[in-house]
Amino acid sequence: MAMSIPAPLGAGTSAVAAPIASYPATVLSVGDGDTLRVQAGGRSVTIRLACIDAPETAQSPWGQQSRAYLMQRLPRGRHVSIQPHTTDRYGRTVAEVISDININLVMVEDGQAFAYRRYLSGCDAREYLDAEFRASRHRYGVWQVEGGITRPWDFRRGRTAVVIPDGTTPGGRRYRCKEIGSYARAQELLRQGHTYLDSNGDGEACESLRR
């Protein structure tokens, strides 16, 4: 196929952003069913799995099962390829993670996460929705409950607290890492807006709790 020559900018066409290049990484830890940390280029990077939404830790036992499944698929030291989509408001790299397979897709296929319909525009939406349909038919994971468990985005919306005037402590309560009890719970609080728990601004709360 002949290569088309793009028209100059300003000639009636709009520029299309080039896809972000993928890069190799090594798994360091798993936070929950859709969050992990990897080592890449000599630095630690927090990855939010693109295209999917896994049960929250508080959605017991589904959140714990989803995290355990991701840990099984991506043990510490596993070499993966990161295919970035964007960066979220917490500074995390939103990406598809490829091991021998697309990890994001298999999380949905095996009923450990839902296709995140609100954020499928940069994904192969049909592939993710088809995977979710198959999981629901087979009653895998989160589909063991008729119609599937409460969707994580609905669960979070139901737990949203009022933000007090200083804008830093949702619900008016401040937590200390030593009283939270678990690394996963600390990441959940960070996603809810307790940004002060991320003291060094690397997108990870209470790193001292990480096992």
Image (tube, rainbow, N blue to C red):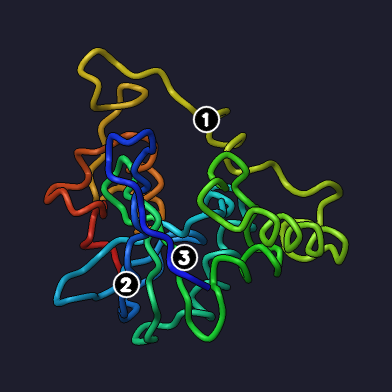
Sequence-wise, the earlier of marks 2 and 1 is 1
Q: Which residue is mark 2?
A: 211
Whether the residues at callouts 3 and 2 have beta carbons within 8 Å, the answer is no
The kind of residue on which mark 1 rests is Arg
The kind of residue on which mark 2 rests is Arg
Marks 2/1: CA distance? 27 Å
Q: Residues within 10 Å of mark 2 (few under 14, many from 20)?
A: few
| Image quarter (top left, top right, bottom left or bottom right) of the C terminus | bottom left
Could you say where residue 9 lies in the image, as x and y percent from the top left?
Answer: 27, 40
In the image shown, does 200 or 134 lie closer to the viewer?
A: 134
Task: Reply above or below: 136 against 106.
Answer: above
Marks 3/1: CA distance? 28 Å
In the image shown, does 111 or 211 lie closer to the viewer?
A: 111
Q: Which residue is mark 3?
A: 96
Q: Residues within 10 Å of mark 1 (few under 14, many from 20)?
A: few
Sequence-wise, the earlier of marks 3 and 1 is 3
Q: Which residue is mark 1?
A: 159
In which quarter of the view is residue 28 placed?
A: bottom left
In which quarter of the view is residue 210 placed?
A: bottom left
Task: Reply above or below: 14 against 113.
Answer: above
